[in-house]
Amino acid sequence: MANKVIFRTWKDGSVIALFPRLPADRHGYKCESYMHVGQHAAADPGIVSETTPSTKKEYDPLLKELKTIGYTGLEIAKKITPQDNAYRQKMADKQWGKLR
């Protein structure tokens, strides 16, 4: 399965890459994210309500950075789906053991 990534822009203009299928906590509630400053971190997928979709011009520098650190096969998408959430929780269960 490709690494799905969603680029969102904060009010200050900074861009965040969300990986909605990659769990960042043992419950699968949070997903992995990446920004220029801070780099990898856990993110609440609900931040989509606090951000706007990034334009290609906005996210292109971050996409290039992701590729230089080894991300390949990225599938750029616009939305986090219920299927992404279910997959992330399934992967968390597989990685850390079922907790729910």
Image (cartoon, rainbow, N blue to C red):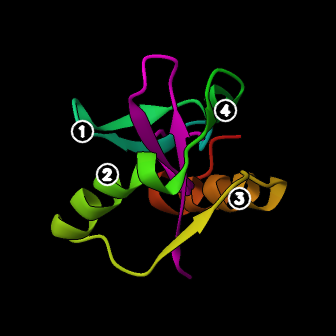
Asked if marks 1 and 3 touch (Cβ < 8 Å), the reply is no
Q: Nearer the viewer, residue 63 or 96?
A: 63
Disc 4: which residue: 48
Please provide percent x and percent y for residue 85: 72, 51
Disc 1: which residue: 36
Give whichever of discs 4 and 1 has the lower sequence position.
1
Q: What separation in Å lies between label 1 and label 3 (alpha carbons)?
A: 24 Å
Q: Nearer the viewer, residue 86 or 77?
A: 77
Q: Is residue 85 left or right of residue 68?
A: right
Please provide percent x and percent y for residue 31: 52, 43
Q: Residue at x 37, y 57 (%)?
A: 60
Asked if marks 2 and 4 touch (Cβ < 8 Å), the reply is no
Helix, strand or loop for disc 1: loop
Disc 3: which residue: 84
Q: In the figure, residue 35 lies in which quadrant?
A: top left
Q: Is residue 90 left or right of residue 33?
A: right
Q: Residues within 10 Å of mark 4 (few under 14, many from 20)?
A: some
Helix, strand or loop for disc 2: helix
Q: Which quarter of the image is occupied by the N terminus?
A: bottom right
- Residue type marked 4: Val
Give whichever of discs 3 and 2 has the lower sequence position.
2
* Span colored in magenta: 1-27
Disc 2: which residue: 62
**Which residue is at the far front?**
57
Q: What separation in Å lies between label 2 and label 4 (alpha carbons)?
A: 17 Å
Q: Residues within 10 Å of mark 3 (few under 14, many from 20)?
A: some
Q: What separation in Å lies between label 2 and label 1 (alpha carbons)?
A: 7 Å
